[in-house]
Image: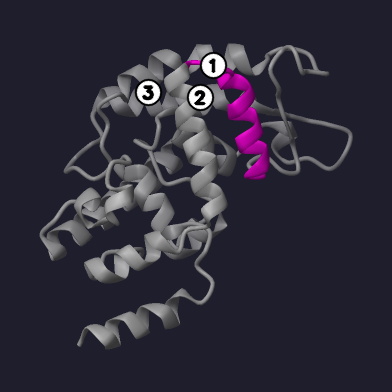
Amino acid sequence: MPGIANLTITEFRALVERFDEKYVNHWNTWIQACEAQENIPRVFGCILRSWQAFRPNIMRRPQAEAGHEPPYLEAIINGVTPSIQVLENFDISTNKPFCDQSINALTGLWNSLLQLSFEGRKRTKRNGLAGAVGISKAVLLLTKGRVGPAFDSKVRKSLGISEPESPAEWISALGLANRDIIAFQEANQCTLRQAAPEHFSHIHAGRIYDMALGPGLKGITKRLQRIADSAR
């Protein structure tokens, strides 16, 4: 089993702790914007651009900042709100989280969020449409970490998968993440949130899992070995 299935709690915590701090700060900025219900489209766009979620395509902007034709970020975010609401109780760390409703909501998110980017003057991919990296990062934000991980190259390498190219492939990849989490939880007799460092335990499981596999993996194998050796 790839990912975290064979890790101890100590090893898992080390993975989460080494997550790049700048991304932790981005996340805190996003959650604060959501709680205040202020500047959500602007903050959403700024964070995803800083995460390079759509390169080489161009990400759409809020209407006040846009130099492009509709749709603007406000319309896209408003359009996916019903799907986000369906996923309000989604938990990637539970057994069988994928019911018909959640699958339909995830499929709808993929199809709508394709429009988050467009084709510019430079080289583009997918005729300017967003791909799995951008879509999964956007969904991670919009669900406040319930649906994760984001499938960037580091996460895909850890899970041994290629980039999803359709809603079905994305949901299948999420299913792989779910099975990996369940295996870890069963082996360690705890939930993912219980295993996380205490200062991250309030975060939803999809985000915690994303932190474990995401940016900051450089040199982690040797570090994990040192931790394992010291625990003996």
Q: Nearer the viewer, residue 24 or 128?
A: 24
Q: Residues within 10 Å of mark 1 (few under 14, many from 20)?
A: few
Residue occupying image coordinates x 52% and y 34%: 29
Magenta span: predominant SS is: helix
Q: Nearer the viewer, residue 226 or 126?
A: 226
Q: Tell me how far mark 1 sits from mark 2, CA to CA.
A: 5 Å
Give the side of residue 150 with respect to residue 1, left or right. right
Specify start and end residues of the magenta stretch as a single range.
37-52
Tell me which corner region of the image, top left, top right, bottom left or bottom right, holds residue 172.
Answer: top left
Q: Residues within 10 Å of mark 3 (few under 14, many from 20)?
A: some
* Between marks 3 and 2 in the image, the one whose residue lies nearer the viewer: 2
Give the side of residue 80 with respect to residue 224, left or right. right
* Among numbered discs 3 and 1, the one appearing first in the sequence: 1
Q: Amino acid at mark 3?
A: Ala
Residue 33 numbered tag: 2
Outermost residue on the right side: it is 121
Label 1 belongs to which residue? 38
* Residue 74 in sight: yes
* Among numbered discs 3 and 2, the one appearing first in the sequence: 2
Q: Amino acid at mark 2?
A: Ala
Residue occupying image coordinates x 49% and y 40%: 27
Residue occupying image coordinates x 28% and y 22%: 101
Task: Identify the secondary structure beneath mark 2.
Answer: helix
Question: Quick check: marks 1 and 2 in contact, CB under 8 Å?
Answer: yes
Label 3 belongs to which residue? 105
Q: Amino acid at mark 1?
A: Glu
